[in-house]
Image (cartoon, grey):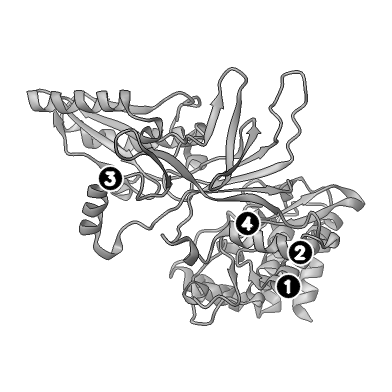
Amino acid sequence: MVDANEYNIGTSTKAQKCEKNIPPVLLDAFALVEVKAEARGVKQALPQLFQYTRGIYAEQYNRRFAWGLAVGGKQVQTVFFGPSYALASPSMDIGQKSGREQLIKLLVDWSFCESHKLGYDPTILFNKQSRYYEIQVGHGNKMTTYYSQGAVIGVERLFGRHTRCFVASKTKPRPSVEFRPEFFIKDAWPEATSDAEEDHRDESGHLNKITAILGDDKSLNGKYPKYINGGRVHIKRRTTGQKTDMVEDNSRSILSDSICSQLDTALKERGPPLRVHKRICMKGIGKPLKHINSVPELICVMADAMECHWEIYKRCGILHRDISTNNILFTGSGSSIKGMLIDFDHAFCENDNNTVHRFERTGTLPFMSVNNLEGKVKKHTVLDDWESLLYILCWLGTYGWRNKSKVCGVGPDIPQGGISARAENSKTNASRQTTRTRYLKGQPRAEPGFKEISRWFTGELSA
């Protein structure tokens, strides 16, 4: 296994794409090759290979994993980039016959194997001529094909969830007709249990339950994404001879049994987490907060989102646990504006007998409650989510909602002392009226309505 930290390699595409000169067009690249003149250059080639492979994930919306070659003189290493790790082969010395045979065998295997073994997703097909994607969503034999012109949210990291989001329609895009998407498709690789029945943080399961219970309540229409279909992704794989089976797509099934066994032995109990490929189709497409026009609209949107949060908690027994600026969208404008609460990846059911995951530290750092930051044995409750709402309003009142870096919760670094020190800061500042007032007054007035929000926020906390 290759450790990215050993080479001081970041994993975010968004922050470093321009700085590191990642090629902007990698739509057709299968694997990248980084070549250095000297044999010792293999180790020097790895950081650049990591860097550029992020571009493959960013540009290719149907890529599940990636391959690369690091070359130094006559030494060649194959690198496999999985959802949570990178694996490098022993060096092949192409100056020797055995090394040349190994490399030739590898290239032949790549040339004739199925596309899913190369890292492509057979359930997302790209029509090069008409420039649209065909995306299959469903479960078992009940599959529906949707059409999209591309991802509205792409992969920003080399490792992790690899979340991609598409707006889609059941009608194929045509050059002379305006494309009108009706559905929102989320494709991701979250951590999960191998047994789907024991997967207590399954977003598709949560949304299915919420839609079944609240679907007929017209007052909540448009305030949460309605579940249409989806779940764990399965792909066709050849097993023995010409026989094919539908196999669940996860971070272990993409590797051979022998490699999985070696990983388990080498890493023992601290091995990479199981990540399962999931895809959900939802009804409801919203806009991010940065497009809101006024403070009254912002307040209406936040009120709608938290009303929906409470109804879901009260009537469905599901707690969201990640209230942040990224997870609240809106539809409409003016008097018809409506807030929408999204992203139930970290949610859990109140009546779930498995309580271990309830004590996890989850959420977006600037908006996490003190209890959540401190990581106490107290479980996450509905009050933690409401505390997050207060931090969001303070944040938006301070920085504004059109600030591209700040609206997503990208704020100050974690203070010295780590997350527990940040928890202590939050607790201390929230209890001091002078600190709150001085902090709010000392920030730049990013929005015309800043005074209204800061005055409201300061007054509420003083009550």
> In the rendered image, which residue does mark 2 sit on?
214
Q: Quadrant of residue 371?
A: bottom right
Q: Quadrant of residue 79?
A: top left
> In the rendered image, which residue does mark 4 sit on?
343
SS at mark 3? loop
Residue at 26% from the left image edge and 31% from the top image edge: 70
Q: Can the viewer see residue 229 in this picture?
A: yes
SS at mark 1? helix
Q: Quadrant of residue 215?
A: bottom right
Q: Residues within 10 Å of mark 1 (few under 14, many from 20)?
A: few
Work out whether 121 lies above or below 131: below
Q: Can you tell which of label 4 and label 2 is closer to the viewer?
A: 2
The circle on residue 256 is 3
- Badge 1 amino acid: Arg
Q: Can you tell which of label 4 and label 1 is closer to the viewer?
A: 1
* Earlier residue among tags 4 and 2: 2
| Left or right relative to 205: residue 18 | left
SS at mark 2? helix
Query: Gap between marks 4 and 2, in whole Å?
Result: 17 Å
Between 27 and 70, the residue placed more toward the observer is: 27
